[in-house]
């Protein structure tokens, strides 16, 4: 029986580093960080997400700074100072919810790219109009269009459909 491709990929996912050394991207990518839950999809990765705010592993590894505070954490939290509580939070999460939702200013980059593309397109269109396309034929001028309408009115006089119905031939102007 063959395993589905995604299941196979989850079982053994490796890649080659620049030196030819094979690197395994399995559960070891947590690398010393404590597994604290299931996460958004069951992978042992840290992800800041707005829709699922509970990552599977802690943000930082256990070290000599946080170990005594973790032991103190097991007792009453009233014994912890505000700084220790903040340190515990920072070892578990990369940023607070307000930091996560804060504007980054990335919209300026997107706006600059969009305006640059629009500017280049406009410049290209102007270059085409000036150097590539020929002059407009005389049929596009207003005098020619008016003469064409007058000619059509003279040739189609007496018809009961179209523009001649709306033209007063005696007063030489359009009916209201």
Image (cartoon, rainbow, N blue to C red):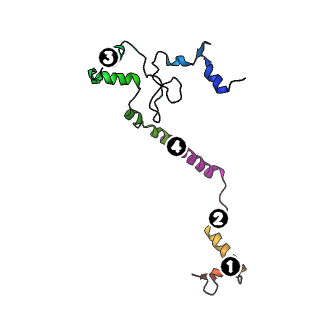
Disc marking residue 114: 4
Circle 1 sits on which residue?
A: 153
Question: Comparing marks 4 and 1, which lies closer to the viewer?
Answer: 4
Magenta region: 112-140
User: Quick check: can you spot residue 161?
Assistant: yes
Determine whether 94 is above or below 118 in the image: above
Picture disc at residue 140: 2
Q: CA distance from mark 2 to mark 4?
A: 34 Å
Any part of residue 17 in sight: no
Q: Which residue is mark 3?
A: 72
Which of the two discs, 2 and 1, labels the residue nearer the N terminus?
2
Res 162 → quadrant = bottom right
Quarter of the image with the N terminus in it: top right
Q: Work out how far the residue at label 4 is from the one at label 3, CA to CA, in angstroms.
A: 53 Å
Up-down: is 68 above or below 77? Answer: above
Residue, far front: 75
Q: Give the Cα distance between marks 3 and 2.
A: 86 Å
């Amino acid at each position: 029986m063959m395993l589905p491709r995604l299941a196979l990929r989850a079982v053994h996912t490796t890649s080659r580093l620049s030196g030819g050394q094979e690197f395994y991207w399995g559960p070891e990518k947590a690398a010393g960080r404590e597994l604290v839950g299931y996460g958004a999809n069951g992978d042992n990765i840290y992800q800041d997400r707005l829709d699922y705010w509970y990552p599977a592993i802690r943000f930082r590894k256990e070290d000599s700074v946080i170990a005594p505070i973790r032991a103190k954490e097991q007792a009453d939290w009233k014994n912890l100072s505000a700084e220790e509580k903040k340190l515990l939070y920072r070892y578990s999460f990369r940023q607070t919810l307000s930091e996560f939702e804060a504007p980054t200013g990335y919209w300026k980059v997107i706006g600059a790219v969009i305006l640059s593309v629009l500017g280049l397109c406009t410049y290209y269109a102007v270059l085409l109009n000036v150097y590539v396309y020929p002059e407009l034929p005389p049929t596009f001028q207003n005098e020619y269009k008016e003469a064409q309408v007058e000619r059509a009115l003279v040739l189609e006089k007496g018809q009961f459909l179209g523009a001649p119905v709306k033209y007063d031939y005696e007063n030489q102007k359009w009916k209201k």
